[in-house]
Image (spheres, helix red, strand yellow):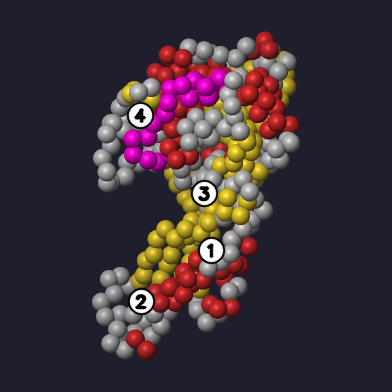
């Protein structure tokens, strides 16, 4: 594996902005790299995800390595010291938006797969550069999996070179209180939807949520609140809406998440609507992706053969990996949480490196990640 070329490819990806739905330039660069490195087949699917296949010498099972190519934007506020699209190397690290989340992992996957000894490989390796993950976790990956039918999935989201065997899910919960308008000089003639929502929020914040020994607690995080009419010129608001980000643990479902709010007898006098948000986004190809924003959590036992074999392979490659679980939501919400395909997570950087100012990735960790992917593939698909 040519590590200088791996670093240069990572820099190329970082220099190309790729907000969700605007990933076309990165997709083209990935497709060109896979083709130049000798992947047996490379194509772009209807959602713009790039898929490359390495065929082993003998037929067998299929392993899919997935990394998304969309990134969050550059938030206003404290300025970056390094150009977010400069891919500057300083003190042994590459700086730039998306380098940790997760263009570095993608570059490592592409180069790791291309450098495999195909004569020692039974089955095939698929690498996907998937789109729109930042807004709809796992939805674009579903199309990739339907086309490739993997037996195993490796998600490249950051694990600090540890091995994740599970991950929290995510739901977007919309709550609406419906009041009755009146002139603000006579508020007693109306019903203030904002005051009702204040009671709802207090009740939600008091819900006793479960916790998991490796994933931590489930969470409700209030992310926005709006009322109508707005501005409320001398009018008592008749509508108030809030959005909660709900972090999920394995075994949680839509009905239970909503019932914990709506079945509260203390809110029985409030006209309250609770629902899971629906997401609709357009890929750069023009395809429209729609999904309910409920992305389930997932977990594999530590004794699972894919988990145990991959952990042993990383140790054999000199990587002191430990078993962990993602605290954030990933494309594994589909591969493991819905499709039930054995899935692990392994990648460079830490979860705290994502979405931050002066995002960075150590080059040593980038190279170690590529070596780790090769070790996991060899252990799982050895001939």
Mark 2 and mark 1 lie on one chain; the one further toward the N terminus is: 2
In the structure shown, which secondary structural element does the residue marked by tag 4 occupy?
A: strand
Instruction: Give the Cα separation between the discs numbered 4 and 2.
Output: 47 Å
Label 4 crowd bin: few (<14), some (14–19), many (20+), radius 10 Å: many
Mark 3 and mark 4 lie on one chain; the one further toward the N terminus is: 4
Instruction: Give the Cα separation between the discs numbered 3 and 1.
Output: 16 Å
* Figure disc tally: 4
In the structure shown, which secondary structural element does the residue marked by tag 1 occupy?
A: strand
Query: Residue at label 1?
Result: 275
Residue 97, position as x, y percentages in the image: 36, 34
Instruction: Give the Cα separation between the discs numbered 2 and 3.
Output: 32 Å
Q: Which residues are magenta?
A: 354-374
The single residue placed furthest to the front in the displayed view is: 320
Mark 2 and mark 3 lie on one chain; the one further toward the N terminus is: 2
The quarter of the image holding the C terminus is top right
Mark 4 and mark 2 lie on one chain; the one further toward the N terminus is: 4
Q: Residue at x 28, y 31 (%)?
A: 83
Nearer the observer, disc 1 or disc 4? 4
Nearer the observer, disc 3 or disc 1? 1
Q: Residue at x 48, y 63 (%)?
A: 174
In the structure shown, which secondary structural element does the residue marked by tag 3 occupy?
A: strand
Residue 325 appears in the rendering: yes
Between residues 302 and 32, which one lies in front from this camera angle?
302
Between residues 276 and 262, which one lies in front from this camera angle?
262
Instruction: Give the Cα separation between the discs numbered 2 and 1.
Output: 21 Å
Query: Residue at label 4?
Result: 95
**Position of residue 167 in the picture relative to residue 193 (left or right):** right
Q: Residue at x 68, y 21 (%)?
A: 379
Query: Residue at label 2?
Result: 237
Residue 150 appears in the rendering: no
């Amino acid at each position: 594996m040519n590590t200088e070329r791996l670093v240069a490819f990572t820099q190329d990806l970082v220099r190309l902005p790729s907000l969700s739905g605007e990933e076309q330039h990165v997709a083209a660069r990935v497709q060109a790299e896979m083709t130049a490195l000798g992947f047996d087949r490379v194509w772009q699917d209807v959602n713009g995800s790039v898929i490359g296949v390495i065929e082993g010498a003998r037929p067998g099972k299929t392993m899919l390595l997935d990394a998304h190519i969309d990134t969050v934007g550059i938030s206003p506020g404290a300025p970056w010291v390094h150009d977010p699209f400069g891919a500057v190397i300083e003190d042994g690290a590459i700086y730039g938006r998306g380098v940790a989340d997760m263009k570095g992992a993608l570059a490592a996957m592409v180069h790791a797969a291309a450098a495999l000894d195909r004569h020692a490989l039974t089955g095939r390796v698929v690498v996907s550069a998937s789109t729109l993950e930042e807004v709809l976790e796992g939805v674009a990956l579903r199309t990739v999996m339907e086309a490739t039918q993997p037996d195993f999935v490796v998600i490249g989201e950051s694990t600090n070179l540890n091995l994740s065997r599970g991950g929290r899910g995510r739901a977007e919960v919309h709550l609406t209180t419906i009041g009755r308008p009146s002139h603000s000089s006579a508020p007693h003639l109306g019903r203030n939807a904002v005051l009702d929502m204040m009671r709802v929020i207090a009740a939600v914040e008091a819900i006793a949520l479960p916790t998991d020994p490796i994933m931590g607690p489930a969470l409700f995080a209030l992310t926005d609140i709006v009322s109508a009419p707005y501005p409320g010129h001398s009018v008592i608001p008749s509508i108030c809406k809030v959005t909660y980000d709900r972090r999920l643990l394995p075994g949680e479902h839509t009905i239970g998440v909503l019932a914990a709010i709506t079945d509260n007898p203390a809110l029985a006098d409030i006209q309250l609507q609770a629902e899971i948000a629906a997401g609709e986004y357009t890929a750069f190809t023009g395809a429209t992706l729609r999904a309910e924003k409920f992305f389930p959590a997932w977990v594999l036992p530590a004794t699972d053969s894919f988990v145990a074999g991959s952990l042993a392979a990383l140790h054999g490659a000199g990587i002191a990996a430990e078993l962990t679980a993602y605290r954030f939501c990933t494309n594994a919400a589909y591969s493991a949480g819905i499709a039930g395909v054995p899935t692990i997570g392994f990648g460079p950087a830490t979860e705290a490196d994502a979405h931050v100012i002066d995002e960075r990735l150590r080059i040593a960790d980038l190279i170690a990640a590529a070596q780790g992917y090769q070790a996991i593939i060899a252990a799982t698909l050895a001939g």
